[in-house]
Amino acid sequence: MSITDITELGRRWAAAEVQGDTDTLDELAVDDFTLVGPLGFVLDRKQWLDRYRSGQFVTTELNWHDVTVRDYGDCAVVIGIQEQRAAYQGRPSDGKFRVTQILVRSDGRWRLAGLHLSPIAPPPGAPTNGS
């Protein structure tokens, strides 16, 4: 399996999030998948998928770019930028996040074991425009 397989998983994941395609998301995730959201909340696989199934979370755009891959054999760490237009329970949930994906090779294919989102902001004390 190659880095192309890993980046293809990222493409499929992003497309499935926008389409609310829980069948594909379910297929891409391992049983004990965990998401750590941008505010520190934690969702298990069922909770993650149920947000889409219930219509509570709707993603209208998700751009996944600036991706780097570190392949460790049966595990890979993927870091990229996710820019999204989304809503949770009708409230905007737009943002630009640095995302870490933890992937494991299972039954000859890559699957998502975890996602961790962090809002992108300048480091503390960094000058801002106009300073």
Image (cartoon, rainbow, N blue to C red):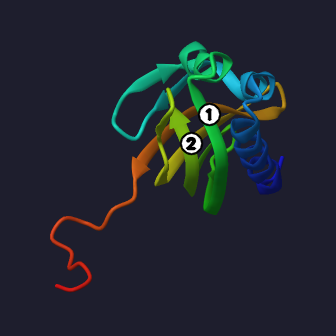
> Label for residue 86?
2
Answer above or below: position of 5 versus 32: below
Q: Are marks 1 and 2 in contact (CB under 8 Å)?
A: yes
Q: Residue at x 69, y 43 (%)?
A: 73
Q: Residue at x 21, y 86 (%)?
A: 130
Amino acid residing under circle 1 = Val
Q: Residue at x 64, y 62 (%)?
A: 65
Element on which disc 2 rests: strand
Q: Is residue 53 visible to us here?
A: yes
In this picture, residue 79 sits left or right of residue 3: left
- Judge by depth and name the residue closer to the eye, 75 or 35: 35
Q: Residue at x 84, y 31 (%)?
A: 108
User: Splitting the image into 4 quarters, where does residue 22 fall?
Assistant: top right
Answer above or below: position of 57 versus 103: above
> Label for residue 70?
none
The numbered mark, 1 or 2, whose residue comes first in the sequence reads 1
Amino acid residing under circle 2 = Ala
Element on which disc 1 rests: strand
Q: Position of residue 16 (x, y in %)?
A: 75, 37
Answer above or below: position of 82 versus 42: below
In this picture, residue 77 sits left or right of residue 38: right
> Label for residue 58?
1
